[in-house]
Amino acid sequence: MKAAIVSSALALASTISANPIEKRQDFTKIEYPPGTGENLPSYPPGTGENLPSYPPGTGENLPFYPNTGDANPVFNFTSTYNIVLTPDQVVNGTTDITFTGGLPGSKGFFNYGINSDLELICFSLTITGFRGEFQSLARTATHIHEAAKGKNGPARIVFPNPEGDENVRYSFGCQRGPFTTGLAPNGVDTGTGFKLSQIEANPSGFMTDFHSSLAVPGAARGQFPG
């Protein structure tokens, strides 16, 4: 039995000796299957290596990169506004104006960024101390009105109502014209034909507000700085 084991071991050693590792296949000279790219004179069409320019929409051939802050970007605002809304600024009526007092304890911090070239307005709206339900005849209860200080006027843009609880609520995003409000007292929506450049031309002629079922004329209001 021992003789057989020794004989097998000698035979294996002889095989290894006859096939040293330096004589095994040279993997550096393997021919890859056609179409894999290794043996091609150039990359297959559409891979990007042989294209004179990048595919449309990638941003490489665009005059500017979308939303990145390069030349002529979406977020290059032509004007910005930071407005504090308080209940004591709320008025009611169009001829006999009365200060209503709004919704006591409620307050708003509304920030707007306008790009009038793109007819784009971005917003970050925060309100505190809100109670009741949002209520308005417009599509939402959060608006920009064309109205001077102490006056009422038509809603020109509406925004999503801030969400949260009585302590704090938020709403943010961007929207582009043409604008509609859902209000059409004379058969034409009050947002029809409105341009953001009108705010920039006369910011003090506009105000922003939000409305509650507990203060329908307005919970709090703030004037655009002029």
Image: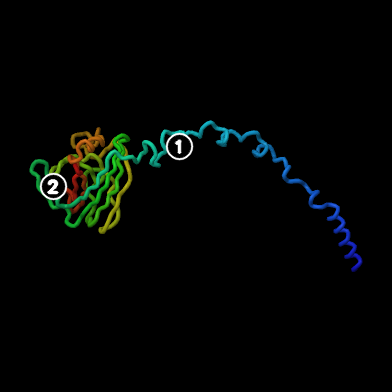
- Residue farthest to the bottom, as pictured: 2
- Measured as percent of width and height from the top left, residue 57 is found at 46, 35
Instruction: Say which residue appears at 73% left-offset and 42% top-offset.
Output: 29
Which type of secondary structure does the marked residue at label 1 adopt?
A: loop
Residue 76 vs residue 88, the one in the foreground: 76
Are the residues at dot 1 and dot 2 in contact (C-beta closer than 8 Å)? no
Instruction: Say which residue appears at 21% left-offset and 37% top-offset.
Output: 184
- Measured as percent of width and height from the top left, residue 98 is found at 9, 47
**Residue under label 1:** 59
- Measured as percent of width and height from the top left, residue 226 is found at 19, 41
Badge 2: few (under 14), some or many (20 or more) residues near its Cα, within 10 Å? many
Quarter of the image for the N terminus: give it. bottom right
- At label 1, which amino acid type do we have? Gly
- State which tag comes first along the sequence, 1 or 2: 1
- At label 2, which amino acid type do we have? Val
- Residue farthest to the left, as pictured: 96
Compared to residue 38, the image places residue 5 above or below, namely: below
Whether residue 66 sits left or right of residue 87 in the image: it is right
- Residue farthest to the front, as pictured: 22
Numbered disc total = 2
Which type of secondary structure does the marked residue at label 2 adopt?
A: strand
Whether residue 211 sits left or right of residue 118 in the image: it is left
Whether residue 138 sits left or right of residue 45 in the image: it is left
Numbered mark located on residue 91 in the image: 2
Instruction: Say which residue appears at 11% left-offset and 41% top-offset.
Output: 94
Instruction: Say which residue appears at 25% left-offset and 34% top-offset.
Output: 195
Badge 1: few (under 14), some or many (20 or more) residues near its Cα, within 10 Å? few
Q: Quadrant of residue 35?
A: top right
- Measured as percent of width and height from the top left, residue 105 is found at 19, 57
Q: Quadrant of residue 224?
A: top left
Q: Quadrant of residue 192?
A: top left
